[in-house]
Amino acid sequence: MVGVTAQEIVYRTNLALSLILLAPLLSFLILILFGRLIKRSHLIALTASFISLFSSIFLIFAFYRTGRYEVSFNWLAFGGQGLKVGCLIDGLSSVAAFVVSFLVFFIELYSVNYMKGETRYTRFFAYLSLFAFSMLGLVLSQGYFQMYVMWELVGFCSYLLIGFWFERDAAAKAAKKAFFITRLGDMGFFLALLLLWSATGTLTFSSLFSRTFSTAFLTLVTILLFIGAVGKSAQFPLFIWLPDAMEGPTPVSALLHSATMVAAGVILVARSYPLFSKAPLTLSVVAWIGAISALLGALLAIAEKNLKRVLAFSTISQLGYMMLALGVGGLFASFFHFFTHAFFKALLFLCAGSLIHAYHAQDIDEMSGALLKLPYTTFAFLAGALSLVGLFPFSGFWSKDEILISVWESGNYWLSSLAIFTAFLTSFYVFKVFFRVFLGLPKRDLHEMPFLTQVSQIVLAFIAIFSGGAFGWLSGMMKSLVVEKEAHAGFLIPFLSTLMVVSGCFLAWLFYRYEWEGGFQASFLGMALHRWLFIEDFYRLIFLKPVPYLKTFFVNLEKWVVDGAVNGIAGAANYFSYNVRRWQQGYVQFYLGLSFVCLIILVMIWWLK
């Protein structure tokens, strides 16, 4: 943009912001209204996502040229106050918009062949376009009001896509489960907005972050915001919806439940960091919840046999890493891992889709020999797996070690130990899946999926390998948000991290080589892990088992207390009116006699005084 005036850059930035949001929205409207008249409906969605991708790249260059940029207008004005909507361009929003639009484009490209033959093929791409609009609107929001609206719209899209095959009972139940559990977290987000609005009369980031609040108020608000993030990002204890969400089509898992939607909670905390950084108690809660989620997700992934559910538990674990980094002050480390994780986890889900298509099964015990028959999928899956475990020089190594170093530099060695041990568990369950699925002899005749699906896998594989090189670029983008202290962990953390990766790989090889896995699955620990460490049973005990008793209690409460009180008051009034009516006889002499008696009583009262 050399030689371009500042006014032209502003005009082009506004145009790019309009295109990045309107293109997927128009795609949704066209497909949902006129989809039956369009033969190749996927072309509409792909064109819209490409426009969004091109616009997001322009926004990154615009940010480099002009710095932070905000545009907004009053959506609703009342009593001298108003709710604003608009867009904010800074390092966080521009990079997040690029990640979302990039993944939407390539996952839609993958879906062209993967979803071919579906009766609701057009509707699927319409839902993806609506999700793209919602998620891009969320990351580009200039205030909490717009972010909350888009937050809820993202949840609605998740409900539609998880339950896309609603004729399956499991998919319908999973969609409802995800919807209701994430709503629990959303209540915290909503209450936080009410508190901020009542205290300031505004919900725009620039206005809120420049104000001074008491520590107690900030602690309460940030805890409520974090509850919203816990629900959306599937953190402990509201994580139980994410594995069931794998009932949706695999491209949905790749897009919503690995890289973009579930990362919305991380984006919320990162965007709100000027508030969180002044609430040390909240940061401690964020760090510990993140560490517990990372450890728990890895443990559950070890005992799981369903391929997509293994990746779902892995997502919980990696999101826990991001929250852990945010809790110890590692904003850049968390965002860097968000960036790399988005690509390699989406890649792993796409590879899982190819494997499920080839084997017609999701249980890893029914898979073997993919190395010999599926070379492109093998290469792509291995690239994603090595990035996930954090082996040098793959992208996950750079971002995960940034997190481990941030935790180490915080001085909390309990958290640091949990994070390093989780790295060992991650390596174990990832290589357990790889050895089980890709080694051995093929159990059936396998073949790769069509060309377009391979293109998406190969592109994401190369990004998974080399996106760690974006370290310097991302750090420059984030300078406007945070200034972090330099790390001094030296080679200790990278050495320990690599040692954990190698140890986990070796142990997984022993389990595969000597067939120990069956005994582990049958052990008490394996069964406990399969029961989700009894968390699912605990939720059933707390939220579902009391329902019949509560129903009986409230029925009786309404019958005997509420209705009884109303009926009792009505009966008392009727009885009183009936008896009072007996005094109204209509005879003048009776009224005169009664008045005389009352007068005598009054005189006696006066005389006795």
Image (cartoon, rainbow, N blue to C red):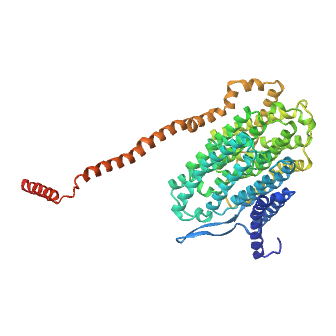
- Depth order, front residue of 171/58: 171
In the image as oriented, which residue stretches furthest toward the left?
Answer: 607
Q: Which residue is pictured at 77% across the width and 54% down the height? A: 128
Visible residue check, residue 532: yes
- Depth order, front residue of 444/432: 444
Q: Which residue is pictured at 88% across the width and 38% down the height? A: 358
Q: From the image, which quarter does the C terminus lie in?
A: bottom left
How far across and how far down the image is residue 160, in percent? Answer: 72, 50
How far across and how far down the image is residue 448, in percent? Answer: 91, 42
How far across and how far down the image is residue 83, in percent? Answer: 59, 66
Q: Is residue 266 above or below residue 65?
A: above
How far across and how far down the image is residue 589, in percent? Answer: 14, 58
Q: From the image, which quarter does the N terminus lie in?
A: bottom right
- Depth order, front residue of 82/371: 82
Position of residue 202 in the picture relative to residue 474 (left or right): left
Q: How many marks?
A: 0
In the image as oriented, which residue stretches furthest toward the front?
Answer: 587
Quadrant of the rendered structure where residue 178 is?
A: top right
- Depth order, front residue of 373/408: 373
Position of residue 453 in the picture relative to residue 485 (left or right): right
Position of residue 11 in the picture relative to residue 76 (left or right): right
Position of residue 470 in the picture relative to residue 608 (left or right): right
Visible residue check, residue 486: no
